[in-house]
Amino acid sequence: MTDADLRIQLAQANHILFDQGVLDAFGHVSVRSAERADRFLLARNMAPVLVTPADVQEYDLDGITSDPAPSYLERFIHAEIYRARPDVHAVVHSHSASVIPFGLSSTPLQALFHMAGFLVGGVARFEIRDVAGDATDLLVRDAALGAALAATLGDAPFALMRGHGSVAVGASLPLAVYRAVYAEENAALQLRSRHLADVVPLTDGEGRSAAETNAGQVGRAWDMWRRLAARHDGLRAG
Ligand code: MN
């Protein structure tokens, strides 16, 4: 893929994540440049469902762009994860509702079904008070906070951010989007099953096997999600 292709795919990812209830007016998704590993693509500061390829800006790993349009305050989430993780080619940052409780509690987010097998790889937990004290606005608004979040993420595919949201990463845009959607779905299932006795999560081996299988099936979901998201195309007409 060229970066021109990735701008189109990134706009689609924005629309899908809105349609699937992962993003609302807030949160964002990015992709690493196909042309320069030290660059990434991210929309300007705007609601995800309204993003078009023309709204996509190119950033360096310091979170700097030559585009004068306003940037997302939390672009450093993306910049510092790309710096720390050469294997990561896409990042989703969201405030999706069912995930939030697990960032607040010591109860672990567990992989409860095969579609979320990737969660057995470990869910990181970012506590902003550990690095910036107890009076921040919770936002990852500079490189130091982004680097702390990336360090907390480590090699994991997913990180909880207390009182704020989460980060899902992947080797491609469709995979990162898939993980963001199914982390939210899995969290909702875990909340729904909390009164059941003897809940049995996936074993590490089951999770790894399921994740490997599902990584080859992501295109099926992407194609459907893209078409479903087209119902919102009229929002960008005006
Ligand atoms: Mn945020």
Image (cartoon, rainbow, N blue to C red):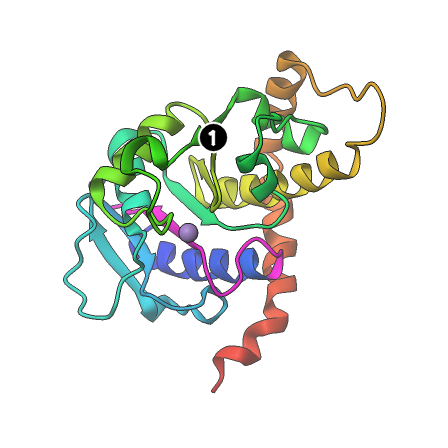
- Residue that lies at the very extreme toward the front in this rendered image: 134
Image coords of residue 213 (percent x, y) = 63, 26
Residue at left offset 53%, top offset 79%: 235
The answer to whether one can see residue 110 in this image is yes
- What residue is drawn where x is 63% and y is 72%? 231
Q: Is residue 20 magenta?
A: yes
Which residue does the numbered mark 1 point to in the structure image?
Answer: 157
Q: Which one is in front, 50 or 149?
A: 149
Label 1: few (<14), some (14–19) or many (≥20) C-alpha neighbours in 10 Å:
many
Q: At x 37% / y 27%, what residue is drawn?
A: 152
Most distant residue in the left direction: 66
The x, y position of residue 211, in whole percent, is 60, 26
199 horizontally vs 215: left or right: right
The x, y position of residue 29, in whole percent, is 42, 52
Residue bounds of the magenta highlight: 19-35
Question: Extreme right residue here?
Answer: 197
Task: Tell whether circle 1 marks a residue whose Cβ is less than 8 angstroms from ligand 1.
Answer: no
Q: For this view, does 84 lie left or right of residue 237?
A: left
Q: Is residue 101 above or below residue 64?
A: above
Please state if 205 lies on the left or on the right of 81 as rendered: right
| Left or right placement of residue 12 versus residue 39 in this view | right
Q: Quadrant of residue 127?
A: top left
Q: Work out whether 23 lies above or below 230.
A: above
Prevailing secondary structure class for the magenta stretch in the rendered image = loop
Asked if residue 230 is positioned above or below residue 36 in the image, the reply reads: below
Say which amino acid is labelled 1. Answer: Pro
Residue 162 % position (x, y) = 47, 39
Of residue 86 and residue 184, the one placed in the foreground of this image is 184
Q: For this rendering, which residue is in front, 104 or 97?
A: 104
Residue 174 among magenta residues: no
